[in-house]
Image: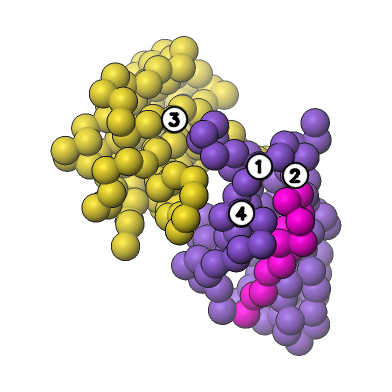
Amino acid sequence: AQTVTQSQPEMSVQEAETVTLSCTYDTSESDYYLFWYKQPPSRQMILVIRQEAYKQQNATENRFSVNFQKAAKSFSLKISDSQLGDAAMYFCDYWSGGGGAQKLVFGQGTRLTINP
Amino acid sequence: NAGVTQTPKFQVLKTGQSMTLQCAQDMNHNSMYWYRQDPGMGLRLIYYSASEGTTDKGEVPNGYNVSRLNKREFSLRLESAAPSQTSVYFCASILWGANEQFFGPGTRLTVL
């Protein structure tokens, strides 16, 4: 069965600095999708970034980028120039894709604190 | 587009009562999901519907039933609520090919 592991329950960073959140996963499939979601205190789930496994290029979205290592099954999120509004729970998510039996698994989450 | 909507937003039940959580999406998405999130925890998949007319168990299906009424709607039913089912429930949907999940705002359920 697919599993997703976020080994850092909590992280903190100074405002304007860079922080990296870790995520590892286990799967025997070759084609899948990985996501990072942000959950602020409002509980709304907000998509931060996504990565298709067939793409070698790492995804970037403004200050957010990923380091996708398919062979190592690692998918870390880097937040540059951290802002106070980045404080939230961050979840890594694996999806096996549409059609047929779908596997969709979340990690346990990392609580990110931004220190002013 | 309203996106993914959930009703109700809050609910308090007594042990043994039943209720149905409603979820609807207006984005013509194929797959829909029900998750629960306990305090300080991640999301755990209860049931999902890969496409209209199909439903499958997720990680924690016990005590729940689902119904994919049509392509838009996916309901979650608690037949006999238990305090262990106190949680925040999220509905989500995915459009195949777009590969992005859209989440509803959540339902906060308390079972006394």
Numbered tag placed on residue B51 in the rendering: 4
Asked whether, in this view, residue A23 is left or right of residue A73, the answer is: right
Q: Identify the residue shown where x is 66% and y is 62%.
A: B53
Is the residue at mark 2 from the same chain as the one at mark 3?
Answer: no
Specify the chain shown as purple. Answer: B
Relative to the observer, which residue lies in front, A107 or B67? B67
Callout 3: helix, strand or loop? strand
Is the residue at mark 3 from the same chain as the one at mark 4?
Answer: no
The image shows residue A83 at horizontal and vertical percentages of 50, 18
Rounded to the nearest angstrom, the CA distance separating label 1 from label 3 is: 18 Å
Provide the residue designation for mark 2: B25
Relative to the observer, which residue lies in front, B21 or A11? B21
Is the residue at mark 2 from the same chain as the one at mark 4?
Answer: yes
Relative to the observer, which residue lies in front, B33 or A17? B33
Give the colour scheme of this rendering: by chain
The image shows residue B87 at horizontal and vertical percentages of 64, 64
Q: Identify the residue shown where x is 62% and y is 80%.
A: B63
- Name of the residue lying farthest toward the bottom: B16
Rounded to the nearest angstrom, the CA distance separating label 2 from label 3 is: 21 Å
Provide the residue designation for mark 1: B29
Callout 4: helix, strand or loop? loop
Residues in magenta?
B63-75
- Name of the residue lying farthest toward the left: A71
Q: Quadrant of residue A115?
A: top left
Q: Identify the residue shown where x is 76% and y is 56%.
A: B70
Q: Which is closer to the viewer, label 2 or label 3?
A: 2
Provide the residue designation for mark 3: A50
Asked whether residue A13 is drawn in magenta, I would say: no
Q: Are marks 2 and 4 in contact (CB under 8 Å)?
A: no
